[in-house]
Structure formats: structure tokens, C-alpha cells
Image (cartoon, grey):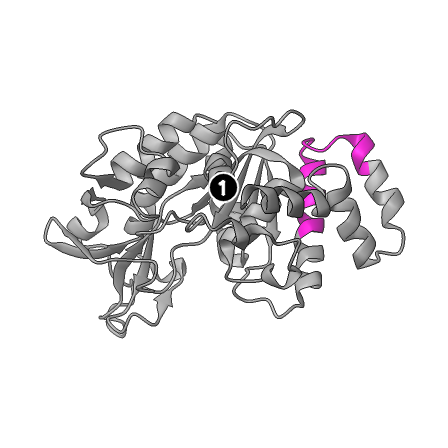
């Protein structure tokens, strides 16, 4: 994973800030009261080409590209959770991508209006997928109820620590969300004009994939999974120059109606199986997992997933000591 170039792509091409010409980091974000600094420019390619509205514009004239996110990685999550210059010996170095479809509704708690090239859009003022570094927020094991849909920061943090993924990258398939003027609804990318999707793939997504070089892509939701697996899979493999690439579908966090424990089990099992299939988790650990799994007792699975690495008790104690 080329972390420097990924930062360049996100914070010099997609979003660019007045104060930082290069090397913008999560630590800079924290120093700026846990919000991004003033923007100097944003990507408006689709707006300039007038492909920023629904392909079915006759009945959806008010829907256009508005919200904007950016990619994040393990390093950002570790800093948010209070870990800097720690010893991560034994963590998995393999590159992994978690992929969502596109930014969602124009929530003022996340997005702020910005005008560039005569186009008004709403880039995120939070560090996307991580949010503000409230360490108590990341104690998912202390309070399992916090591990559920729509809380992406908690979900991705728990994945990083449970599976010890040193090089996880999180991004949207398409970097802009399509919203109406009421800012309450948004469109799926099936409603985007083909030219818009092509622009974003060529300018951002394919470049991200080439910079990360993942062994596996986890798609959150059917839309991103179907696009990757059924339409763009050959092109992605071609750009990566690989014959094999694992793609796994996870239920979308917004849509699930599961208890917190069920949510953890289903997500963790899919992730575990994917990491095994891609060779990131060893055959020995995989065998141990299936031997312990037995009749799939949720509490036992939850215990196993934490016992060899970042244990629940250890995590709680670490956060507790760091917050003193």
C-alpha cells in the first residue's frame, strides 16, 4: 500500500485544503479541533461536464452530486483510538480494502457547504469513516450494543483491532453522493449517469486500487458488490496485474435488523472466511477456528475472535489507562 500517494489522491486531488500543500495527516485534523481545515478546492469534474444529475433527470431534476467523502486507512484509526508509535508486531501486513457504495444523505453534522468553480457541494468536515477521536467511542467490546449499523467508525475500528489489519483501506466506490434539495434523500449509483461513474473510476477508484494492491475487497452492500463482481472485476484484475482477487459481500450496515451479537457474528465470520481464502489468515489459525466453532455458539465465536490478539479485556484496560 502506497500510503503517501493515497493521501495525495484524497487530500490534493479529491479535496484540497488551504493550509496544507502536502502531508496532511490525522494529527493535523486533531489539532484543528477534530475537523478538516478550510478547503481551497474540490473535484468538480462531473459538475463541469454536466453529468452530475440523475440519468432519469425528467423525474429527478433536483437530485445532483452534493456530498463528498474521502478514503481512510488503519493508520488514521489507530491515531483516533489513541495509539501512536506502538508495537504492532504480529499484525497482518497484507493489504485489504473495505468498499462502500457512495456518500449518503447531506447530514449537516458531517458535511459543510463549499463553492468551487461556481458549483456548490457538501464535502465532509469530519475525517471520513473515523470521525472525531473520542476514545470511549471505540470501546466496542466494553459495550457490545455500540457495534451496529450506521456507526462506521466503531465498526471499522473493531475490525482493525480484532483481525490486526495493519494495512486496511476504506473508501467509497463513487466519491460523491447524489442528494435532492431537501437533503433527506439520496440516490444509488444505479441512478448515476455512466459518464459520471466512468470519471470517478478513472480519476480515483482505479488509482486507489492500484495504490493499495489488495488481496481481498470486502463490499458493504449488494450494490457495490454487484458493480465490482459483475461489471468491473476484469478491469480491476487487469490494472492490478493479477489472476486472482477475492471479493466478499457484507450486509450493508444501514439495512440490517440484527441484534448487536448477531451483527458481530455474521460480519466477523464473513471477514474471517475471506481472510482465510485470501491467505491472510494462516491454515493453522483457520483450522483452530473451525475446530473451536463446533455448533456455532455465538459467545464462543466472539471469544475466539478476540482471544489470540487484541482481547476484549485487554482492549478495555488499554483504553482505560490511556484515558486517565
Most frequent secondary structure within the magenta stretch: helix
Q: Is residue 282 magenta?
A: yes
Q: Residue furthest front?
A: 324
x, y percent for residue 153: 50, 52
Q: Nearer the viewer, residue 32 or 163?
A: 32
Residue nearest the viewer, comparing 233 with 261: 261
Q: Secondary structure at mark 1?
A: helix
> Is 99 located above or below residue 62 in the figure?
above
Q: Is residue 202 visible?
A: no
Quick one: quadrant of the C terminus?
Answer: top right
Q: Nearer the viewer, residue 318 or 140?
A: 318
The residue shown at (22%, 56%) is 121
Q: Position of residue 155 (x, y in %)?
A: 56, 52
| Residue segment shown in magenta | 268-286
Give the total of numbered labels: 1
Depth order, front residue of 142/36: 142
Q: Residue at x 54, y 58 (%)?
A: 222
Is 308 colored magenta in this rendering? no
How many residues crowd mark 1 within 10 Å: few (<14), some (14–19), many (20+)?
Answer: many
Q: Position of residue 154 (x, y in %)?
A: 54, 53
Residue drawn at x 66%, y 53% as measured from the top left: 141
Report x, y in % for residue 157: 56, 46
| For residue 239, above or below residue 266 | above
- Residue 295 located left or right of residue 60: right
Is residue 209 toward the left or the right of residue 177 in the image? right
Give the labeled residue for mark 1. 77
Is residue 29 shown to the viewer in this render? yes
Amino acid at each position: 500500500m502506497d500510503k503517501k500517494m493515497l493521501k495525495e489522491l484524497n487530500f490534493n486531488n479529491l479535496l484540497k485544503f488551504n493550509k496544507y500543500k502536502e502531508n496532511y495527516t490525522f494529527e493535523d485534523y486533531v489539532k484543528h479541533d477534530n475537523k478538516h481545515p478550510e478547503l481551497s478546492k474540490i473535484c468538480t469534474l462531473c459538475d463541469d461536464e454536466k453529468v452530475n444529475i440523475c440519468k432519469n433527470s425528467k423525474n429527478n431534476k433536483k437530485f445532483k452530486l452534493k456530498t463528498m467523502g474521502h478514503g481512510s486507512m488503519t493508520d488514521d484509526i489507530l491515531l483516533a483510538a489513541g495509539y501512536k508509535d506502538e508495537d504492532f508486531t504480529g499484525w497482518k501486513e497484507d493489504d485489504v480494502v473495505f468498499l462502500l457504495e457512495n456518500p449518503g444523505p447531506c447530514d449537516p453534522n458531517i458535511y459543510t457547504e463549499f463553492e468551487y468553480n461556481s458549483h456548490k457541494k457538501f464535502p465532509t468536515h469530519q475525517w471520513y469513516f473515523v470521525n472525531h477521536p473520542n476514545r470511549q467511542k471505540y470501546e466496542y467490546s466494553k459495550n457490545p450494543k455500540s457495534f451496529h449499523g450506521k456507526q462506521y467508525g466503531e465498526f471499522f475500528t473493531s475490525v482493525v483491532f480484532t483481525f490486526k489489519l495493519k494495512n486496511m483501506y476504506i473508501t467509497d466506490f463513487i466519491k460523491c453522493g447524489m442528494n435532492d434539495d431537501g437533503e433527506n434523500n439520496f440516490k444509488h449509483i444505479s441512478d448515476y449517469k455512466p459518464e459520471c461513474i466512468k470519471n470517478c473510476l478513472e480519476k480515483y477508484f482505479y488509482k486507489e486500487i492500484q495504490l493499495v494492491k489488495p488481496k481481498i475487497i470486502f463490499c458493504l452492500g449488494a450494490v457495490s458488490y454487484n458493480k465490482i463482481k459483475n461489471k468491473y472485476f476484469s478491469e480491476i484484475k487487469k490494472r492490478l496485474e493479477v489472476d486472482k482477487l477475492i471479493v466478499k459481500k457484507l450486509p450493508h450496515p444501514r439495512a440490517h435488523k440484527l441484534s448487536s451479537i448477531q451483527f458481530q457474528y455474521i460480519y466477523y465470520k464473513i471477514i474471517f472466511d475471506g481472510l482465510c481464502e485470501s491467505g491472510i489468515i494462516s491454515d493453522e489459525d483457520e483450522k483452530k477456528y473451525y475446530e473451536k466453532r463446533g455448533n456455532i455458539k455465538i459467545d464462543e465465536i466472539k471469544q475466539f475472535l478476540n482471544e489470540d490478539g487484541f482481547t476484549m479485556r485487554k482492549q478495555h484496560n488499554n483504553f482505560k489507562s490511556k484515558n486517565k
